[in-house]
Image: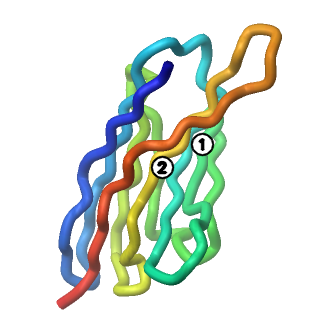
Amino acid sequence: QVQLVESGGGLVQPGGSLRLSCAASGSIFRINAMGWYRQAPGKERELVATIISGGMANYVDSVKGRFTISRGNAKNTAYLQMNSLKPEDTAVYYCNVEIAQWGRPPIGYWGQGTQVTVSS
């Protein structure tokens, strides 16, 4: 089994910054990709950013230029640096990790979610 622990959410004023962290532990053969999703009240969960093992990152248009996803030196960690936050960024943010399986399809795991609230 794989466990994901997220941290870094909270309340911030518009224009402020937050940094989310996600640490994966457990039975990990190889991490193919790590990503962040978010879900606002009454809305579907949406992809925010992903980063693959080679370091290439992808972002939803609404956060480009404001958010940066990165991997930690331990490689089992991922960060989401969020700058110039807007009220519409308010949501529960979830970490997602795709783990390669030897001889089988990869498996995705989800963190428990961390609340980000942008409000004055």
Q: Is residue 52 left or right of residue 21?
A: right
> Disc 1 marks which amino acid?
Ile
Badge 1 marks a residue whose secondary structure is: strand
* Camera-nearest residue between 81 and 110: 110
Q: Is residue 112 left or right of residue 51?
A: left
Q: According to the image, label 2 marks what residue?
A: 69
Identity of the residue drawn at 34% across and 77% down: 85
Q: According to the image, label 1 marks what residue?
A: 51
Identity of the residue drawn at 67% across and 29% down: 107
Res 36 label: none
How far, Cα to Cα, is label 2 from label 1?
7 Å
* Camera-nearest residue between 4 and 59: 4
Q: In the figure, 65 relative to 36: above or below?
A: below
Q: How is the image coloured?
A: rainbow
Are discs 2 and 1 less than 8 Å apart at CB?
A: yes
Q: Position of residue 62 (x, y in %)?
A: 57, 77
Q: Position of residue 116 (x, y in %)?
A: 30, 68
> Disc 2 marks which amino acid?
Ile
Crowd band around label 2 with a 10 angstrom C-alpha radius: few (<14), some (14–19), many (20+): many
Q: In the figure, 55 relative to 86: above or below?
A: above
Crowd band around label 1 with a 10 angstrom C-alpha radius: few (<14), some (14–19), many (20+): many
Q: Position of residue 37 (x, y in %)?
A: 53, 58
Q: Is residue 90 left or right of residue 36?
A: left
Q: Position of residue 34 (x, y in %)?
A: 56, 39
